[in-house]
């Protein structure tokens, strides 16, 4: 198992969001996964989870039925609305039918019940990531594509596009919004992590991305923001 996890760590540049009011389980998750994920965020409520989802592009989420503020069904619905395509694992105190139905309606990958062994959580996470990310490619014009499994952009023939951290973050944010206009404040908060930057800096990043790919890959909407070119079907 440890060897497998080390290989997975090398393959995945993944970010995990964990939502639970169970301090014991949160400690277990933190101890077991902190070194394997690029980013591990632990929150207690769906409101905190949604705030995190607005700030960061996570690769998967684990939701405990024990959450603060709202009941599980309401919390799961709110999180699903905020990130409908984000892979989910549900953890519950028991296997009652209501929680199972909620998990199914939320398109959860799997449903686990407490008490949990750490290896069971690890296996579920690895299998979920394998099933949801392996081989996923988003293709654009001119043979440009984004390989979600390797978390990299490529030109035809598998030639790596040498994006900077900001350029890559900018592209991934636009892709995650699926054609919706992403306003300047959102770009600043997510890509620049809220740090000071000017509109001219943002335009410079856009121009560099266009130079490395093709001009139409990013579309400007005057005084509104940016969208990504429509991926090929």
Image: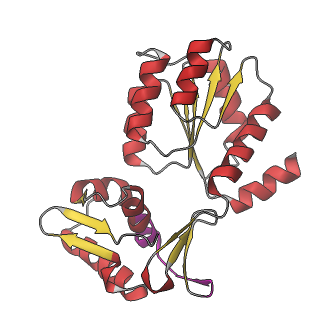
| Residue 29: in magenta span | no
- Residue 152, compared with residue 224, is above or below; it is below
Query: For this view, does 19 lie left or right of residue 51?
Result: right
Q: Position of residue 86 (x, y in %)?
A: 51, 44
Q: Position of residue 59 (x, y in %)?
A: 56, 49
Q: How many marks?
A: 0
Residue at 50% x, 19% y: name it.
67
Span shown in magenta: 157-169
- Residue 193, compared with residue 164, is above or below; it is above
The part of the image, by quadrant, that contains residue 216 is bottom left
Query: For this view, does 224 lie left or right of residue 28?
Result: left
The part of the image, by quadrant, that contains residue 200 is bottom left
Tell me, yes or no, if residue 19 can be seen here: no
Q: Nearer the viewer, residue 59 or 98?
A: 98
Query: For this view, does 221 lie left or right of residue 4?
Result: left
Tell me, yes or no, if residue 163 can be seen here: yes
The part of the image, by quadrant, that contains residue 30 is top right
Q: Position of residue 134 (x, y in %)?
A: 67, 59
Q: Position of residue 136 (x, y in %)?
A: 60, 63
Residue furthest to the left = 223
| Residue 160: in magenta span | yes
- Residue 99, compared with residue 48, is above or below; it is above
Residue at 62% x, 83% y: name it.
158
Task: Indicate the quadrant containing the N terminus: top left, top right, bottom left or bottom right.
Answer: top right
Residue at 68% x, 44% y: name it.
128
Residue at 61% x, 28% y: name it.
90
Q: How is the image coloured?
A: secondary structure
């Amino acid at each position: 198992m440890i060897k497998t996890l080390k290989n997975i760590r090398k393959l995945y540049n993944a970010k995990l969001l964990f939502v639970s009011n169970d301090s014991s389980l949160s400690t277990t998750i933190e101890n077991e996964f902190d070194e394997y994920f690029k980013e591990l965020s632990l929150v207690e409520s769906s409101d905190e989870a949604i705030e995190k989802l607005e700030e960061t592009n996570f690769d998967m989420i684990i939701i405990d039925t024990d959450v603060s503020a709202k009941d599980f069904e309401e919390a799961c619905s709110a999180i699903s609305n905020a990130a409908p395509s984000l892979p989910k694992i549900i953890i519950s105190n028991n296997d009652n039918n209501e929680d199972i139905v909620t998990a199914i309606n939320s398109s959860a990958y799997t449903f686990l019940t407490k008490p949990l062994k750490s290896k069971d959580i690890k296996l579920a996470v690895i299998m979920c990531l394998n099933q949801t990310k392996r081989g996923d490619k988003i293709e654009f014009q001119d043979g440009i594509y984004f390989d979600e499994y390797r978390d990299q952009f490529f030109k035809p023939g598998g030639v790596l596009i040498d994006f900077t951290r900001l350029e890559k973050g900018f592209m991934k944010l636009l892709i995650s919004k699926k054609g919706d206009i992403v306003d300047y404040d959102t770009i600043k908060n997510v890509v620049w992590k809220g740090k000071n930057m000017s509109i001219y800096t943002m335009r410079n990043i856009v121009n560099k991305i266009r130079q490395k790919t093709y001009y139409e890959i990013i579309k400007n909407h005057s005084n509104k923001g940016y969208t990504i070119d429509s991926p090929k079907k």
